[in-house]
Image: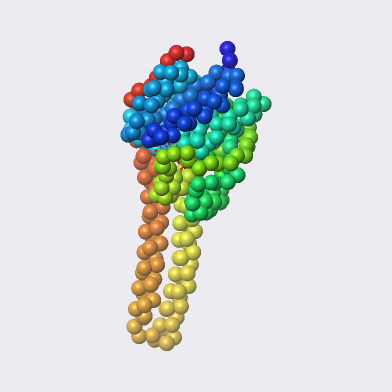
Amino acid sequence: MNKLISILIPLYNEEETLPITYDRLTRVLTDIHYDFEILFINDGSNDKSIKILKEIREKDPRVSYLDLSRNYGKEIAMAAGFDYAVGDAVIIMDADLQDPPELIPQMIQYWEEGFDDVYAKRKNRNGETWLKKKTSYYFYRILKKVSKVEIQEDTGDFRLLSRRAVEAIKGFKEHHRYTKGFFSWIGFNKKEILFEREARIAGKSKWNYFKLIELAIEGITSFSSAPLRMTTYVGFTTATIGIIYMAYVVIKKIVFGDPVAGYASMVSLLLFFSSIQLISLGIIGEYLGRIFDETKNRPLYFINDYDGQRNSR
Ligand code: UDP
Ligand code: MG
């Protein structure tokens, strides 16, 4: 039996891009002599995506689909995909063709050479704003500094994973997911491929700055407790400054008999220290909230429907 390769494509409201993506992907696959499973994960789309998927599935038995019960976000959609994929290797790809399927043969070749995680690193970021490029650049720098895992820069989720790497990722049951960090965390043999990232072919990006900030917080909090330690350091620093200032005020009082202490300095001290306390509480709260979410131990996702190769193998 030929080796089977699963291609995971999480999608949310991609009715415009789906047919184009399917066409271009299958054109690439005809030249490769492996069996394929193209597993679409419909992440609660509220457009015609699921209808289109069912139509494609009718015509092409290589196509499977997993229909999640609502929109969970790409991270959880990928987790669901890993659970259902049956291939000896799994390739994750976006539905908007920003990840060119033409890289797949190269990925498979490296996999055959023994690599477990063949990831595509972008040489450029076409179609993205200057602000997004800058913020993501600094985000990676910070994340690298505070977390102990080496996160690959300018690398998305587009990659091929060997079966054992997929099994490793499936062990991550957490609800707050920063999957890109998991890929680094599991280790194994990694190989980089460079590519030019294209702009989205149609439709709109589902990202906005709010989501980006959330993902950044997710990335940092799920891989590092450095912010907690930082609050301790800030606490010690302000305490030291506080003691020095206190000594200054007391000595001034004794030596000069200073009548009423300055209102301005009182107010600024009060504001300064209370805001530091609030920020620290917020940081502790971030971690506490995550502990709360994880201890509930709820299922990660529910599915409406699945039609695919897991049923027939
Ligand atoms: N996506 C998803 N669930 C979501 C949001 C996005 O499955 O809640 C999918 C989306 O359909 C696409 C991929 O994740 O296939 C990447 O999303 P997008 O192109 O919007 O992000 P960007 O490339 O702009 O970072
Ligand atoms: Mg995209």
The N terminus - image quarter: top right
Q: Is residue 4 left or right of residue 218?
A: right
Q: Is residue 256 left or right of residue 109?
A: left
Q: Position of residue 169 (x, y in %)?
A: 50, 31
Q: Residue at x 39, y 33 (%)?
A: 15
Q: Position of residue 142 (x, y in %)?
A: 53, 52
Q: Residue furthest bottom?
A: 256
Which quadrant would residue 254 be assigned to in this image?
bottom left
Q: Position of residue 63 (x, y in %)?
A: 45, 21
Is 21 or 254 nearer to us in this picture?
Answer: 21
**Can residue 189 be seen in this snapshot?**
yes
Q: Is residue 151 left or right of residue 236?
A: right
Which quadrant would residue 164 be assigned to in this image?
top right
Is 174 or 203 nearer to us in this picture?
Answer: 203
Q: Residue at x 38, y 22 (%)?
A: 54
Relative to 1, residue 205 above or below: below
Name the quadrant where ligand 1 sits: top left
